[in-house]
Image (spheres, rainbow, N blue to C red):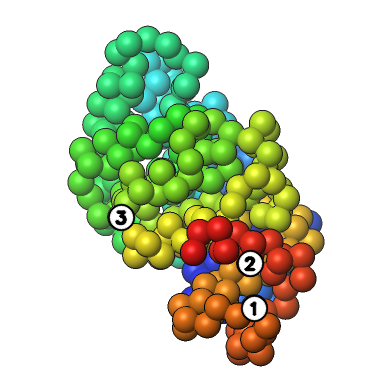
Amino acid sequence: MHNKDLKLLISSCSTDNIVNSIKLAQRLGAGIEVCDFVDPYILENSFEQKLKEFKEAFSSFNGTLTIHAPFYDLNPIAMDPGVKVFTLKRYEQIIIAAQELKVSALIFHTAYNSQVRLGFYDNYFVEKQSEFWQEYIKNFDDIGIKVFLENTYEAEPDILNRIIDNVANNYLKICIDVGHVNVYSNLRISQWIEKCADRVEYMHYHNNCSKFDSHQSLAKGTIDFAKISDCFSKHGLEPQISLEIFDEPSIVESVDLLRSLNCLRAYYRLGTRGWNSTTSLVGCAVASTSQALTRSYASLSEIN
């Protein structure tokens, strides 16, 4: 099931324990995004024990590793100095974990609050976030680890774009979470990709029906991943794709769908439009369901 054209990761929470998640990643030819250290209970009560467990588990893992930073109740630009101090304490823990696990990147939420309806808020938020990251990114620049700022409740990408442009450091880029866009933004995901352009180097993939952030299989929801794939091709972008899906059957279904899309895209680039020439797909070694292939073909027919 390996496909080197996809820079694919799955969550460390994909199964009931890290050993099984590593086995699943190896079977799928994927890297792993470590998500366990977003849990406040682990950070407060068992951080060193969990880190030791993960370090041992990853000792023979050769795939890409990234890590999601904690975010619950945290805000690095909070007006309350106590909140800022506590946030930096949690961030210091994740830097330790990142170094110990030898990850290539961290993913941070921005703590943007879309419910604040004050005229000055967006500019204030961008200014304070930019000031924070201009200094804090040096921690990662020095150790060679990239940071991706992820959209959560932002309705449009200008907030993230302005922060990235203000900081102007190659170690600070954007992670677009397509599920968050589908729920919290009126813009299409393709519009986010076009507006963020080469600032985007990482993606969180999961699906939903645009009402709840339900982290479903890519095959279950209203997001059209064929159109996203086409948008990346159009703009020459090849971001890493991390599946934020937390059960094994849905992950396998999603990987099959992505790889069928990848193979179909290559198939159409050859200039062959006939669907009957399915033998051209054999070399892709895709173990996808007929339902996923049918959905992919229908979406590609619309955009080509």
Of marks 3 and 1, the one in the foreground:
1
Q: Which residue is mark 3?
A: 198
Amino acid residing under circle 1: Trp
Q: Split into 4 quadrants, where in the image is the N terminus?
A: bottom right
Q: Nearer the viewer, residue 225 or 151?
A: 225
Judging by the rendered image, the residue that carries numbered circle 2 is 297
Q: Secondary structure at mark 2?
A: helix
> Could you say which is closer to the camera, residue 89 or residue 272?
272
Q: Are marks 2 and 3 in contact (CB under 8 Å)?
A: no
**CB atoms at circles 3 and 1 under 8 Å apart?**
no
**Amino acid identity at mark 2:** Tyr
Q: Which is more toward the observer, 291 or 107?
A: 291
Q: Position of residue 67 (x, y in %)?
A: 51, 54
Observer able to see residue 84: yes
130 up-or-down from 118: above or below:
below
Give the Cα separation between the discs numbered 2 and 3: 28 Å
Separation (CA) of disc 2 from disc 1: 9 Å
Q: Earlier in the sequence, mark 2 or mark 3?
A: 3
Q: Which image quadrant for residue 218?
A: bottom right
| Residue under the image location 52 percent in, 38 percent down | 181
Label 3, label 1: how many angstroms apart (C-alpha)? 34 Å
Q: Is residue 168 above or below residue 31?
A: above
Where residue 73 appears, x then y in whole percent? Answer: 54, 26
Please state if 64 lies on the left or on the right of 238 as rendered: right
| Residue lying at the far top of the rendered structure | 118
Labelled pair 2, 1 in contact (Cβ < 8 Å): yes
Q: Residues within 10 Å of mark 2 (few under 14, many from 20)?
A: some
Please name the residue that numbered disc 1 is placed on.
Answer: 275
